[in-house]
């Protein structure tokens, strides 16, 4: 057994008993230190968090037999303990239920998936979203600025909605998470270094998924992400994502990339904003075929902060390319795909002909509300034919920091050219989706 395999095997084995050990210690603490003590204080001196999100979704999809109506509610309850000699515990449970209306295909492949309806990938399930033990080194120690986590956890390296490679798929009611070991170090000035080993990816389709394409990823994957924010007008990010999925070899890839983004003042209350990114991808691990594709992103825009009624106005243009050669294309299997190529989810898996997406976005924050409008013009990389255009609109309003109401709609207008009809699958079919939701979060 190689050293790397030995280490990953040891990490997997340790994760199986760490939660049991900690719970035993907690129980002993209750009986032995009923009058208080450091362990008891750490366990009871933490923070409780709660959220609940109700959502109604309607889907009119020309690729489905019947329109879908889904009424679901997502509830989470979590607790983060205090620290004892740098150690802590995080537990977060998640429950998703269908209420009132269930005329939709939940995409799990189960016998009750109602496949005649359009897809709304929000199956009912109850599970742990997070369950890990952590350790943070003391500031004056050799591990100062370093945090270790072992167990079930969320792994993202950018704020939403920029989860292009690592995401929670947070728009769906069931969130994606990892059974993993992670390290984060911030000891260098303006620098954050992260490493993760993931041995299981819990996908949004839950453990109840029957379809093999929807099942959790049996993973043997390594993630490295380094971010530097010490430059005045730029933030720099470099990453290496080595994905090896034993039960999904077609999605096993290695990706190396770099991103630069930032802003430059142009006038009072006005700033130029920009982003540029490149990544190269090839096959890795259990992959079954050669892959050699690229990712490009260019963004330019302006941000106004006039104040008073209008807190911020952002206008920007993006051009994003995921190359494809007709059979193989650049893949992002762990992304929050809903945030890219339009909200109607026609491009969650990159088609073999690749993607070229030119899109305009306007974001307005005013009167305590946020409005977003985005228009995508999407075509293939290989053969350069049109997939279609999409218009997305969103309005949200948060009250008293804890209560959010929102509505959004997406219109995907498929192009009817011969290549798109022959090669595009459901990308050659129109779809309109509408969402209304309410959320409470503490």
Image (tube, rainbow, N blue to C red):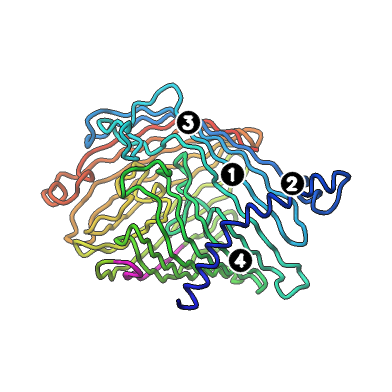
Residue at left offset 28%, top offset 28%: 67
- The x and y percentages for residue 353 are 21, 59
Kindly give the residue lying farthest to the left in the view shown.
418
Q: Nearer the viewer, mark 2 or mark 3?
A: 2
Residue at left offset 54%, top offset 51%: 304
Kindly give the residue lying farthest to the top in the view shown.
100
SS type, badge 1: strand
Q: Is residue 321 visible?
A: no
Q: Nearer the viewer, mark 2 or mark 4?
A: 2
Nearest to N terminus: mark 1 or mark 2: 2
Above or below 292: residue 152: above
Disc 4 crowd rating (10 Å Cα; few below 14, some 14-19, many 20+) is some
The Cα atoms of the two marked residues, 2 and 3, are separated by: 32 Å
Q: Is residue 286 magenta?
A: yes
Q: Nearer the viewer, mark 1 or mark 3?
A: 3
Q: Which residue position holds label 2?
A: 27
Nearest to N terminus: mark 2 or mark 3: 2
SS type, badge 4: strand
How many marks are shown on the rendered structure? 4
Residue at left offset 41%, top offset 71%: 256
Q: Which residue position holds label 1?
A: 311
The Cα atoms of the two marked residues, 1 and 2, are separated by: 50 Å
Between 266 and 24, which is closer to the camera in this rendering? 24
Q: Indicate which disc residue 97 carries.
A: 3
Q: Left or right: where does residue 45 sit relative to residue 420?
A: right
Between 273 and 421, which is closer to the camera in this rendering? 421
Highlighted magenta segment, given as a residue range: 275-287
């Amino acid at each position: 057994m190689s050293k790397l395999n030995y280490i990953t095997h040891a990490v997997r084995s340790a994760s199986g008993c760490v939660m049991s050990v900690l719970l035993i210690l907690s129980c002993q603490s209750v009986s032995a230190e009923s009058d208080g003590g450091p362990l008891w204080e750490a366990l009871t001196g933490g923070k409780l968090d709660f959220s609940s999100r109700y959502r109604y979704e309607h889907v009119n999809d020309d690729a489905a037999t019947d329109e879908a109506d889904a009424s679901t509610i997502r509830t989470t309850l979590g607790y983060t303990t205090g620290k004892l000699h740098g150690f802590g515990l995080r537990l977060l449970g998640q429950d998703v239920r269908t209420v009132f209306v269930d005329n939709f295909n939940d995409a799990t492949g189960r016998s009750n998936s109602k496949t005649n309806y359009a897809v709304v990938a929000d199956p009912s399930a109850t599970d742990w979203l997070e369950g890990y033990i952590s350790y943070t080194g003391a500031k004056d120690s050799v591990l100062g600025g370093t945090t270790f986590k072992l167990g079930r956890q969320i792994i993202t390296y950018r704020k939403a909605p920029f989860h292009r490679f690592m995401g929670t798929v947070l728009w769906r009611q069931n969130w994606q998470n990892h059974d993993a070991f992670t390290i984060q170090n911030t000891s260098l000035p303006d620098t954050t270094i992260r490493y993760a080993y993931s041995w299981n990816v819990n996908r949004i389709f839950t453990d109840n998924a029957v379809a093999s394409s929807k099942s959790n990823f049996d993973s043997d994957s390594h993630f490295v992400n380094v971010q530097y924010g010490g430059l005045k007008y730029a933030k720099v990010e470099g990453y290496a994502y080595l994905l090896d999925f034993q039960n999904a070899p077609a999605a096993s890839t290695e990706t190396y990339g770099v991103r630069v983004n930032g802003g430059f003042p142009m006038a009072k209350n006005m700033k130029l904003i920009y982003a540029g990114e490149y990544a190269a991808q090839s096959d890795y691990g259990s992959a079954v075929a050669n892959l050699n594709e690229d990712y490009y992103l260019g963004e330019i825009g302006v941000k106004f902060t006039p104040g008073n009624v209008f807190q911020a106005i952002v206008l920007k243009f993006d051009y994003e390319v995921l190359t494809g050669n007709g059979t193989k294309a650049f893949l992002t299997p762990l992304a929050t795909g809903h945030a890219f190529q339009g909200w109607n989810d026609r491009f969650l898996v990159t088609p073999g002909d690749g993607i070229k997406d030119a899109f305009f976005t306007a974001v307005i924050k005013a009167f305590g509300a946020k409005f977003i409008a985005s228009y995508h013009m999407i075509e293939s990389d290989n053969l350069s034919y049109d997939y279609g255009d999409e218009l997305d609109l969103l309005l949200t309003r948060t009250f008293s920091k804890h209560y959010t109401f929102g509505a959004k709609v997406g219109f995907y207008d498929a192009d009817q050219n011969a290549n798109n009809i022959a090669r595009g699958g459901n990308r050659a079919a129109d779809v309109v989706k509408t969402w209304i939701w309410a959320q409470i979060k503490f």
